[in-house]
Image (cartoon, grey):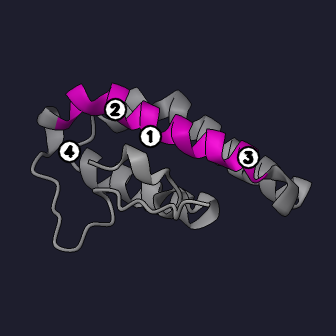
Amino acid sequence: MAIKTRLTSVEAPGFHWPLSGASCKCFAAFFREEFIKHHQCLEQQREYYSERAIAQAEDALGRILAEIDELCQREDACDVIARLLMKIDLVTNLSAWTSSETLH
């Protein structure tokens, strides 16, 4: 069984988003993909959570995905989205689980 690890840019020590405001708008597709990965991870862990917890997490992810374009237009977009990704990661723990062969 391979050890699975992942350190996302959101959690990297000393990492700071180099972009803000208008520059961040072009990352909407990237951010959307990251939230979709969290949703897929949540689906794989469904058996470990109550239906209420799953429903709340799915609701939060749904709202974020529905508003990602608007979020990316904020002046503090990258900071806000980074905080949302970290909060979702507390539930999914996606940053800790990925196949070692996908690491570069």
Total number of numbered labels?
4
Camera-side mark, 1 or 4: 1
**Residue labelled with disc 1:** 34
**To which quarter of the image does residue 6 belong?**
bottom left
55 is higher (above) or lower (below) than 28:
below
Find the magenta span and give its range: 24-45
Query: Is the Cβ of the residue at disc 2 closer than 8 Å to that at disc 1?
Result: yes
The mark that comes first in sequence, 4 or 2, is: 2
- On the rendered image, what quadrant is the N terminus found in? bottom right
* Dot 2 amino acid type: Phe
Front-lying residue, 81 or 29: 29
Regarding mark 1 in the picture, which secondary structure is present there?
Answer: helix
| Gap in angstroms between the C-alphas marked 3 and 4 | 34 Å
Residue 49 appears in the figure: no
Query: Is the Cβ of the residue at disc 3 closer than 8 Å to that at disc 4?
Result: no
- In the rendering, at what x and y percent does residue 79 appear? 28, 56
**Residue labelled with disc 2:** 30
| Gap in angstroms between the C-alphas marked 4 and 2 | 18 Å
The mark that comes first in sequence, 3 or 1, is: 1
**Residue labelled with disc 4:** 75
| Gap in angstroms between the C-alphas marked 3 and 2 | 21 Å
- In the rendering, at what x and y percent does residue 10 appear? 32, 59
Q: What residue lies at 56% left-to-right and 46% top-to-bottom? A: 38
| Gap in angstroms between the C-alphas marked 1 and 4 | 20 Å
Regarding mark 2 in the picture, which secondary structure is present there?
Answer: helix
* Dot 4 amino acid type: Glu
**Residue labelled with disc 3:** 44
Q: What residue lies at 22% left-to-right and 26% top-to-bottom? A: 26
Q: Is residue 42 magenta?
A: yes
